[in-house]
Image: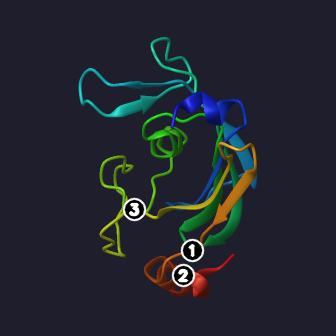
Amino acid sequence: MPSYWIEDGTVVKKYYVLVNGLVKNDYGEINFPISRSKHSGKMVSKPHNLEGKQALTLYNVIKRYGGYTLLDVEIKTGRNHQIRTHLQSIGYSIVGDELYKIRNVKDKFNLNRIFLYSYHLEFDDLNGDRKIYKSKLTKELKNILNKLKSYEK
């Protein structure tokens, strides 16, 4: 799906994301360009990245737990690894994400995936009808949140 469909609002994509650390602001936007690192090959996002493509990610805090924050994230552009690299650029890594992990973060959940879950997709179909699809968290991810409930803040 071309990223301009997201940028012009034709497609809306939202995600649940659990990050290591307590996100300070209840909501925010990350508006940093993203490019591929010539050294590591990973995507990188920095405020003054002149070589990168513009990218915009919005987030709202759903809940804070002891050492973790559950976010509702919406991407306004469709860049490769956008959510992962944008969150890393502001000091947070997604639970289970070994590629974009912040140093010294210990993963105690042993997930076989990252805690990044697309729960909302919205677009106009070929007939011009608005389609909205929603999904609930998987049992595996719900179990992690249930374990964290005793730390809720």
Q: Position of residue 121 (x, y in %)?
A: 63, 55
Classify 10 Å Cα crowding around label 3: few (below 14), some (14-19), many (20 and above): some
Q: Residue at x 24, y 30 (%)?
A: 40
Q: Are marks 2 and 1 in contact (CB under 8 Å)?
A: yes
Horizontal side, residue 57 vs residue 86: left or right? right
Q: Residue at x 54, y 36 (%)?
A: 78
Q: Which mark is nearer the camera, 2 or 1?
A: 2
Q: Which mark is residue 114?
A: 3
State the residue in front, 119 or 42: 119
Q: Which mark is residue 40?
A: none
CA–CA distance in space, label 2 to label 3: 16 Å
Q: Residue furthest front?
A: 127
Q: Amino acid at mark 3?
A: Ile
Q: Which mark is residue 148?
A: 2
Q: Are marks 2 and 3 in contact (CB under 8 Å)?
A: no
State the residue in front, 61 or 13: 13
Above or below — where is 92 with respect to 52?
Answer: below
Q: Which residue is mark 1?
A: 66
